[in-house]
Structure formats: C-alpha cells, structure tokens
Amino acid sequence: MKKRSVYAWALYDWANSAYVTTVIAGFFPILFKTYFSANADVTVSTAQLGFANSLSSLLIVLMAPLLGAIADVGGLKKRFLFLFSYLGILMSVALAFVGEGAWEAALFIYILGNIGFMGSNIFYDSLLPAVAKEKTFDAVSGLGFALGYLGGGVLFALNVWIVLDPAWFGLESTTAAVKVSFFSVAVWWAVFSLPLFLFVKEKKPEREASTTRVIIEGYQRVKGTLKRVAQFKGLVYFLVAYWFYIDGVDTIIRMAVDYGMAIGFETKSLIFSLLIVQFVGFPATLLFARLAQKWDTKKAILLALCIYIFITLWAAVMDEVYEFYLLAVMIALVQGGVQALSRSYYARMIPDGYEAEFFGFYNFLGKTAAILGPFLIGTVALLTESSRAGIFSVVFFFIVGAIILMRVDEKKAAREIASALP
C-alpha cells in the first residue's frame, strides 16, 4: 500500500509535466509568435510572453501561503490539488479554440492555465511527507521529477510527430496540429492524475470545522508564522537562496525556445532540443537523487548551480545549432536534479501538520522569482535590443543563490522551526 501511494504520487508529475513540455516550453511560444501575435515585432512578442509568465506567477504568489494554511487546517490538500489541476486542464482545451491574431485571448487563457499548473504543485509538493519517510525524501522526490521528464517527453514526442506530419493524422495544417497537441495535454493530465486522487491518503484534521472557521484559522496560522519568521534563520536563508537560483531555472525553462527563435534557430531544431532535455532528464534526475543520498543533498544542489552558471554564459555567446543541442544535454543533466533535491531538502525542515502552509511559502518565493526572471529578460531585451543580453542577465541569480545556500544547515533549521511553532 505504501509503495502504491508513492508511485501514485509520483505519477502526478508524469501527468502535469505534459503542460510544461507541450504548452509552456514547447508549442505555445512558437504559436504565439507565428499565429496568435502574427506580424508583431519579435522583441515585442518576447516581452509580452515574459510579462504573461510574470503575471501568472504573481497571482499564485498572492494566494499560495494562505491557501496552504487553509489546506493544512481543513485537510484540503487533495481538494485544492484537484481544483487547480482541472483549471489547468480546462485552459489547455481552451487554447485550442483561440484564433489567429487573438493574442490577448491567448495570453489570458495561458495565464489561467499557468495558475492551474503552479497552484496544483503547491499541494502536490506538500503531500511528499504523506507518502515518504525523511530518509527517502530525495529518492521519492527524484522519482517524481524523473517520471515528469519521461511522461512529458513521451507526450511531447507524440505531439512533435503530429506537428511535423499533420497530413498523416488527417489534419490540414501545422497550426491545427499544435491545437490538437494542446487538447492532448488536457486528456493526459486528467487521466494520469487519477491514481493520486484514488490512492494517496491525506491526514485528516484533528477536528471538524466549518468553512468559515477553517479560513479564519488558516489566516491566523499564516499571520502567526510570519510573526515568528525571524526565528527561522536557516529556513529564511534557504528560501532566499532558492528564490534566486530557481528564478534562473524557471526562466530558462520558460524562455529557452523563445530565445532560440530570437537568435535565428529553426523551429525543428528547438523542438528537438526539448526532446533531448526530456529523455536525458529522466535518468539524470534519478542519478542526481542517488548522488544526494550517497554524497550530500546541499552539495549536489551547489554542483548543479555551478553547471547552470556555465550554461547561461555559453548560451549568451553561442552561434551554432549544435551548441544549442549540447546545452540542452547539460540542462537535462541538472534541471530535474536541482528541482527534486530542493523540494526534498526543504521538506526536511518542515514540522508535521504544516506541510501545505510551508510549501505555500516555498512556492510563494519560487513563483515570485519567476516574476522577475522573464520580466528581466523582456526588459533587458527591449532596452538593449538584444536577446543575448537578456539571457546573460540570468547568471546573476545562480551566483547569488549558490552563495547564500552555502550558509544553510537544514538540521539546525528544522530544530529552530520545531521549537518556535506551537
């Protein structure tokens, strides 16, 4: 039963990663430039996409801590996970019905879809302690991200086939094929979410309370936690470090295809690079989780950040498409690792009964960072009229994040939190 709940939980990453690969990283940036905002200046569309990513992150930032506390108090993690998941699923379907030149509608639906995806991850992450013991956090978290890369890659590969040969599937154009791929994301996400909802058990609240009471207690809990936050020095250091370095990770995920188009690479080459990331990312994430268990979780994260610094510097000066492929391999080696190990490292600091609230803060800061990164790329690109300058600016976040992370001791942080909370 325990093993079944672990795989059911990890399979949700397989389910919703389809949205990241096919929509966020894959076809939406391409269709936005060539169809939704047809004939617009390349730099302007880059800025519009960056600002849309920032706005969706901002809206999640405003909701995450309070919703997390409410979920803890009321035992509502799975219910909130369901609601946000199906918002993302419905918006994936809606993208398929947006017409040419309707960039405003496309961005509005895209923003709502991102909110569904990011909001569901708050409650998905918070269920990690419900399915794993502390000594297996790295392995289970790594399994989730690894399955995410594999599942997202499998569906994306199928969608690439459909897009490259739409006539074989009875479709009249590449645009129609991309819209079918958006619909496939919704089906995939809905179907493979079911095991989590069926087999992962959420701890029930100690006492029943009305909806109003749950909301009030959730608000009071967040307020109390914020008052005590100065006592959580180790946690604060980690969250600030995470705020910086995950900005770089998320920004590269969201803007890599747009950047490749801006410097002149063909769409087919960019799609192939995304497939490289997905299928290399699957074993690489599992290996990084094993490295963390054998070596040290924090040191493994720092290693990944050093590689990211090199990746960003190289990306700013590359000219050839083979370099883009090599960078895709390097990103695949570390992207899943830094995401999975950050989640498991943070989970070790959280006391029982506060998972969703504290993962609300975790996602709060992670998505705050995702506001700044795409916004910075868009702004620098506009001011300098250079997409290369925009991507170069991201290296700052990896450097600062690594420096601050070196000051964190997760065991000491866990003791500080446990002694301060009621």
Image (spheres, rainbow, N blue to C red):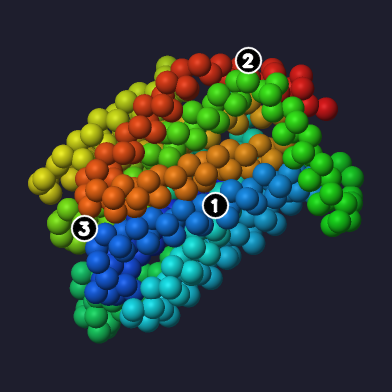
Secondary structure beneath disc 1?
helix
Q: Where is residue 75 in the image (x, y as percent from the top left)?
A: 77, 48
- As measured in the structure, the alpha-carbon distance from the residue carrying label 3 to the one carrying label 1 is 26 Å
| Residue under numbered circle 1 | 58
Closer-to-camera residue (233/349) = 233
Q: Where is residue 380 in the image (x, y as percent from the top left)?
A: 31, 47
Crowdedness near tag 1: few (<14), some (14–19) or many (≥20) residues, C-alpha within 10 Å: some
| Residue under numbered circle 3 | 261
Q: Residue 344 vs residue 177: left or right?
A: right
Name the residue: 51% across, 57% down: 56
Q: Which amino acid does label 1 sit on?
A: Leu
The image quarter in which residue 198 lies: bottom right
- As measured in the structure, the alpha-carbon distance from the residue carrying label 2 to the one carrying label 1 is 31 Å
Closer-to-camera residue (105/150) = 105
Note whether residue 285 is visible: no
Q: Which amino acid does label 3 sit on?
A: Met
Q: Where is residue 372 in the image (x, y as percent from the top left)?
A: 44, 45
Q: What residue type is labelled 2?
A: Lys
| Residue under numbered circle 2 | 412
